[in-house]
Image (tube, coloured by chain):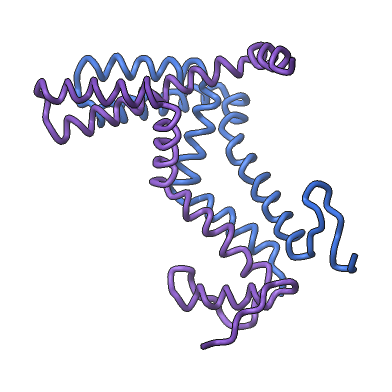
Chain colours: A purple, B blue
Amino acid sequence: MIENLIIPSLAFLGIMEFFSDMILVLKIFVLLTIVSWVVMHLGKGPLAIVLIVGISWFVLFDQFWFFGGVYVLMMLLMLGIAGIFIDMFFVFPGFAAGSSGAPEAKMSSQGGVMQRMKLFHKAPGGRKLPPPM
Amino acid sequence: MTGTMIQKGIFGQLGMNEKGMLHIFLLILVALIVVIALPVIVMKVFPMADLIIRIILIFLIFTTVRGYLGTGVPTIIISGVLIYFLVVKWVYFTAAAYIAVYFLLSLQVFSIIIFGIGMGMRKG
């Protein structure tokens, strides 16, 4: 019942067309990656062409629901999205706790991470650190 | 319910710390949307900027495909298909994605935005 309402509305708004086009573009980029990888390893001989066809069929037409997501995730990780999550979930608690008067160290050093963790645990409602062993 | 707890809709009971974090995340989200929407606004307001951004995107797509396949006919065909979809049909989405990926992620500008908002909301 719901599907009968949702799918025509999405089609009316052009969202289905947008997604189908973007999936095609994503498949082209995945194909480029496969071709580039096989040619880099095997050159442009007949074995490379057979391998390109086989891998492309498996990745693009058989299991694209999996490899499409993996490709997008791999691209995002290569572009450094993990650093943004570190900023959001580890740097912010230090900001919320405020400064303790001492100059702050960078996140790249172990001392800096410990300093931010201490600030986070000192904040109202923050967790208590276990005593040092 | 204690004084430091608030009722927050579907999020349930949140402490003051969590409430502050929620505000920061919302601010980051708004800042991100503004920065990503900027090229679309510029393209709508200035037609010359629209043309320049389209040319930049065409160069970018062709260079990317040439990097994968080298020079040749397949490069031109695949570039043509990608240019039709990304530059002709969905140019506003592509421009926004270009800004998001190349400026915000590759050049770490998004980290600067997060850092700036965090510093702005800092206590003490």
Give A92 or B6, whichever is nearer the viewer.
B6
**Residue A124: which quarter of the image?**
bottom right
Q: Is residue A88 left or right of residue A52?
A: right
Where residue B80 sits, quadrant-wise, is top left
Q: Residue at x 45, y 34 (%)?
A: A69
Which residue occupies the foreground of this view, B114 or A48? A48
| Residue at x 67%, y 73% (from the top left corner) | A127
User: What is the quadrant of the N terminus of chain B in the image?
Assistant: bottom right
Q: Is A16 left, or right, of B75 in this rendering?
A: right
User: Would residue B71 be found to the left or right of residue A20 on screen?
Assistant: left
Q: Is residue B92 above or below residue A77?
A: above
Pick the quarter of the image with the C terminus of chain B. Answer: bottom right
**Residue at x 65% of width, y 75% of height:** A121
From the viewer's side, name the closer residue of B26 and B41: B26
Where is residue A92 drawn, in percent x and y?
A: 62, 63
- Using the rendered view, name the quadrant where residue A88 is placed: bottom right
Q: How many marks?
A: 0
Residue B105 x/y as whole percent: 47, 46
Q: Is residue A18 above or below residue B119?
A: above
B70 is higher (above) or lower (below) than A40: above
| Residue B22 percent location from the top left of the image | 72, 55
Residue A61 vs B104, above or below: the answer is above
